[in-house]
Amino acid sequence: MKMQTRWVASYHLDGVRPDGKSTRIQRFFESKQEAIEFRSKLLSNAAPAKRTFTTVGDITQAWLASKRRTTRSNTFTTYEHRAKLLSPLFPLRFDKLATRDIRRWHDGIAGTGKIYSASKALGVLKSALALYAEDSGVRPIAMPNNLQRRQERPVRKHLSVEQVRAVVASGNLYVAFPFLAGTRISEQLGLCWDCVDFDANVIRIRRVQDKITGDLIECTKTAAGYRAIPMSATLRRMLLEWKPDCPVSMSASGSERVFPAPQGGTLLYLSFLRQFWKPALKRMGLPPVSIHSARASFISMLQASGVELAVAANLAGHKTPAVTLQYYTHALKGGEQAMKALDAVLS
């Protein structure tokens, strides 16, 4: 005999009985999804709602306004693009929004092949609804489970240790720097000489350069981005040799950039790609890897040298070691020892 599973939502309702006691009520559903949606509506109605007619569009715009005050311009632009994908949900009122609506919206976006974009936009929706729930004193609705997930991204190409040795041996500091310091491109182009401390033998990451405008921003991508990177012997030598010949490029704050344009001035991200990165790799007969792959190569070489995981995460500017684990799984030693080990790998 086949048993049929039913889902039950059990709750108490006040003000029904003459004696003032609450009444227990049970509702049965054929699917778990229907039970969850019913529970979400109960919780939303039970919580004190200050703005009954608030829509998802209102909530999303309020969240964007809060992010505009706390994020960099290029990061905020990314949030705006992701929020636009939520436009089909904008007219829906918060108290009428159900997990079914979110699932249908997500499946619609994912059905066009934009699974990754749908996942990121869903993250914006979760954050926006959570902020509204916190500010308004209502309970956030339950998010749908088992949504279609994006396919694994193709594995990025990385240079081998021998190929990285060739890059370093070329003497081109612009191209070799991310392999030796593990910096993001915005951190490299935003680096100024006041953050290169030859006495302490460290490079202090304190600011980044906006990829579009070239302006210096006095903050990093994340809080973990503020860090001091010990200079290996190779990197120290290359910086000392470059400093006397470095074209003058003063920032608005009066600091001189380490990586200016060839004739001085600001070197924009796209110009760096066209004038330095791509031509250098082509000249050396190396595959056209991305700039970000240099960070992965940096971490991989730390792996080969036996550096501790926490130290590697700190040098790379990762928020948690879990992010660093995406690049390697070995138990990775201290900052200066790590850079010495890196030199040993490349020698």
Image: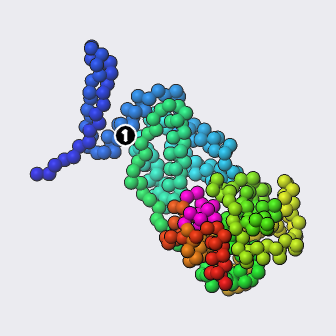
- Point out the stretch of residues depicted in magenta: 309-320
Give the residue pinned by disc 1: 37
Q: Nearer the viewer, residue 342 or 259?
A: 342
Q: Secondary structure at mark 1?
A: helix
The residue under the point 59% across, 73% down is 302
Is 147 contained in the magenta span?
Answer: no
The residue under the point 73% across, 77% down is 234
**Residue neighbourhood size for the residue with mark 1, other residues' Cα within 10 Å, grouped as few (<14), some (14–19), many (≥20):** some
Residue 114 visible in the displayed image: no
Mark 1 residue type = Glu
Count all numbered tags in the image, as a single digit.
1
Is 315 contained in the magenta span?
Answer: yes
Classify 142 as above or below 319. Answer: above
Residue 252 in the image: x percent, y percent? 85, 54
The residue under the point 75% across, 68% down is 201
Residue 203 in the image: x percent, y percent? 74, 65
Q: Residue 241, located in which quarter of the rendered image?
A: bottom right
Q: Nearer the viewer, residue 133 or 233?
A: 233
Q: Residue 128, located in which quarter of the rendered image?
A: top right
Classify 342 as above or below 54. Answer: below
Colour style of the rendered protein structure: rainbow
Tell me the quadrant of the picture where the C terminus can be found. bottom right
The residue under the point 50% across, 31% down is 137
